[in-house]
Image (cartoon, coloured by chain):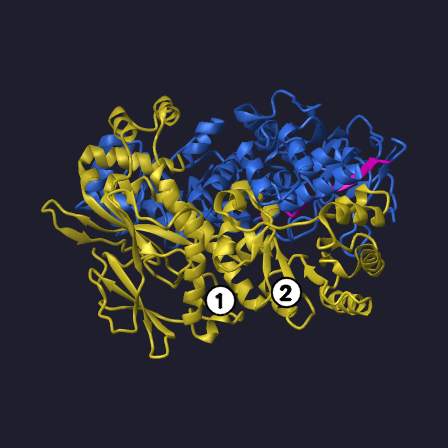
Chain colours: A blue, B yellow
Amino acid sequence: MFTDHYELTMLQAALHSGAAHRRSVFEAFARRLPDGRRYGVVGGTGRLLEGLEHFRFGPDELNFLANNNVVNDETLAWLSDFKFSGDVYGYAEGELYFPNSPILTIESTFAEACILETYVLSVLNHDSAIASAASRMIGAAGARPCIEMGSRRTQEESAVAASRAAVIAGFHSTSNLECGLRYGVLTQGTAAHSFTLLHDSEEAAFRAQIGSMGAGTTLLVDTYDVEAAVRKAVAIAGPALGGVRLDSGDLLAQARDVRALLDSLGNTSTRITVTSDLDEFAIAALAAAPVDSYGVGTSLVTGSGAPTASMVYKLVSREGDDGEFVSVAKAAKNKASVGGRKYAMRRLNGSGIATAEVVGIGHEPASDNNDRPLLAKFMTGGVLAAGWTGAEGVVRATARHAASMAEMPGAARRLQRGDAVIPTEYEQATTPRN
Amino acid sequence: MFTDHYELTMLQAALHSGAAHRRSVFEAFARRLPDGRRYGVVGGTGRLLEGLEHFRFGPDELNFLANNNVVNDETLAWLSDFKFSGDVYGYAEGELYFPNSPILTIESTFAEACILETYVLSVLNHDSAIASAASRMIGAAGARPCIEMGSRRTQEESAVAASRAAVIAGFHSTSNLECGLRYGVLTQGTAAHSFTLLHDSEEAAFRAQIGSMGAGTTLLVDTYDVEAAVRKAVAIAGPALGGVRLDSGDLLAQARDVRALLDSLGNTSTRITVTSDLDEFAIAALAAAPVDSYGVGTSLVTGSGAPTASMVYKLVSREGDDGEFVSVAKAAKNKASVGGRKYAMRRLNGSGIATAEVVGIGHEPASDNNDRPLLAKFMTGGVLAAGWTGAEGVVRATARHAASMAEMPGAARRLQRGDAVIPTEYEQATTPRN
């Protein structure tokens, strides 16, 4: 019952007026990107479809709604039979989006689409915020792998969703085991400071870890004195020592010192991982440091300053009494929307580089051979198409993200604040209905 | 399995060295408050305890760990028998906290406490961030009720936790039905713009809503023209119209115009709710406007600029080979901690106003009659004490928060950036062990 109270009161009132059964088109989109961002990344579509298949109101929910007089008996009866039976299409997960991109479209009766609002937005807003931040980090990291380790900085279920979104945007692996279990993504991790402190000496802790995990493990070397710890680690593990992790201090200077020390001890293939409050800017600043991988936590799971994607879910078209669809949009100041069902494609130049997001209102925009259509059909009459959910969906979304990034002009990867890297163009402007 | 990979590799290595069975004391605390905040609010304790009772590794989890070679057979066997059997104490939910307040303490074997790290921090970091932001909004709103309506701006399970945390900090109600179901909190909501757009005219939509919900409902009046909508609403519902909601535009000016219009039409008891991207500063700015209640969304569920509470979970004390406890702490630069088991109380002056957070290391701090001890015992030998969880826990935490706020000096309610409103004093300084 991830539903806001007002969705059910609207449902009740619309059942009362009869308008609940009008065919309706709802659209999820973002009016803007977070300040200064060049693009957004669609995240959560797979999770959304997984949940939509099982979106029901069971006895506990119906009893709660009845006992608290949230809705009347007619509405309770409708909810008890509810199973989504509409059509869903939109941008593939992992795809890039821009202001007003029609990211998700739901066509069904008003009643069915209305009660999905909060769930649709919760999933898309959260997961897209994380995927969008993650994608910038991947750009800053270049060829070096990023490991997601932010679970502790966000709610426990958000952590699983955030891990999943990070992997879609290009993260190599995650510390979150539940995400590994649910989505088959690679998990990784070795030890915390508490493990060192548990033992009578740092040496005893290193011996325990290597004895149990093998010399290829990564040792955390900044509990006491970094240089002494690296020397102990090499003395115990030898040249096969897999890696060392730095989690505090001046990472740039420390990485250089530790690299030089490791090399001088003959451990030229021991890797250095850094993990202290990194964001895309800190990662970029470490580009010249001898670092092999980045562990990213807080800033990833909080969207690096943009913890939500500000997507909205609006009725854009619905049947009238004559059965014809009518475009609709709110006309009030500062939040006006563009009504009508949308179609979208990415305009590419002869070199395959994106130049615009083209949105057609009420029809597919005209296209030449280079243009790439952006809408996929996820559900038809409530039946899910194959390949978008579960582990398969994550693999597909990861590939989609990489391919879409490869199409972008180089400016997309700039961390400096700027406008959307390509403009959104409406092929046919419409006037909001009044 | 809300657990990071490294917790299980540490467990394996500690089982290998034998240190896994050492009695250990872990502490959750925040080194600092978010920039400029005067206090933090402990949120999530009840949820944490609910989860801790059911924290187990089932067949699916164990198979995943085995198939992916996360841990060895010895560790799998230990996990399959795991049920938390330690002691948990800490600050009551709803209590205020300051830098280094010992918010939660877990005493058990290293093995048991180690694998709870991510779960403990996920819950406390998220829920405390929301409760802390919510408390400032309540302060800004004064006697006017605040309604939580941010579910769509955060992950769907986070939304339930955020609603719960908001209510603890003093929110009147929430739009989140699942939170109502799980925790018995009041839910509220009426209609969105889509409901108006669904109908052939605004008048038809208002008639439908009033026909179904009664004249006491709240009508959304900014889909087209606010003044015209208010006139229609009053014409249809009469003087009994419950309320109108404004969701866009210049809320200050609009609230004045709408209030004057309602009064001129005789609707002096029709309430005005405003809901457009409010945070504590916007709420404060509306103090002089004729607004009756605030609906708060995005900024609430994203912690109003501080989406996580930056709490950490550290080993502070553990048994040595002789069975005696030894205080431990990381010594490395810029993240040093204070080792040792902590006790805490709030020092109050003769007027019952808080003057300091007093933390004793290894012993209860000396107290006079005015001082209030802060640590409660939540679990003993894995058995939960009564009254901290479920709906009962939310009621108790709400009362705790209100009482603790009443003790604070007036500066706590200031929105301007500043230091913690009371200092944290260690009764006995210790030197980090090296």
Residue B36 bears which disc, if any? 1
Q: Is residue A194 above or below residue B138?
A: above
Of B78 and B140, nearer the camera is B140
In this rendering, position of residue B247 left or right of residue B15: right
Q: Are marks 1 and 2 in contact (CB under 8 Å)?
A: no
Q: Residue B380, image x and y in percent?
A: 25, 47
**Crowd class of label 1 (few under 14; some 14 to 19; many from 20; radius 10 Å):** few
Does the magenta-highlighted stretch encompass residue A318?
yes
Q: Residue A43, image x and y in percent?
A: 60, 37
Q: Secondary structure at mark 1?
A: loop
Residue B282 bears which disc, if any? 2
Of A235 and A325, nearer the camera is A325
Q: Quadrant of residue B111?
A: top left
Q: Residue B181, image x and y in percent?
A: 52, 42
Does the magenta-highlighted stretch encompass residue B282?
no
In this rendering, position of residue A277 left or right of residue B21: right
Q: What residue type is disc 2 on?
A: Ala
Q: Quadrant of the N terminus of chain B?
A: top left
In this rendering, position of residue A433 left or right of residue B186: right
Q: Secondary structure at mark 2?
A: helix
* Residue numbers of the magenta segment: A308-320
Q: Is residue A18 above or below residue B335?
A: above
Chain label for disc 1: B
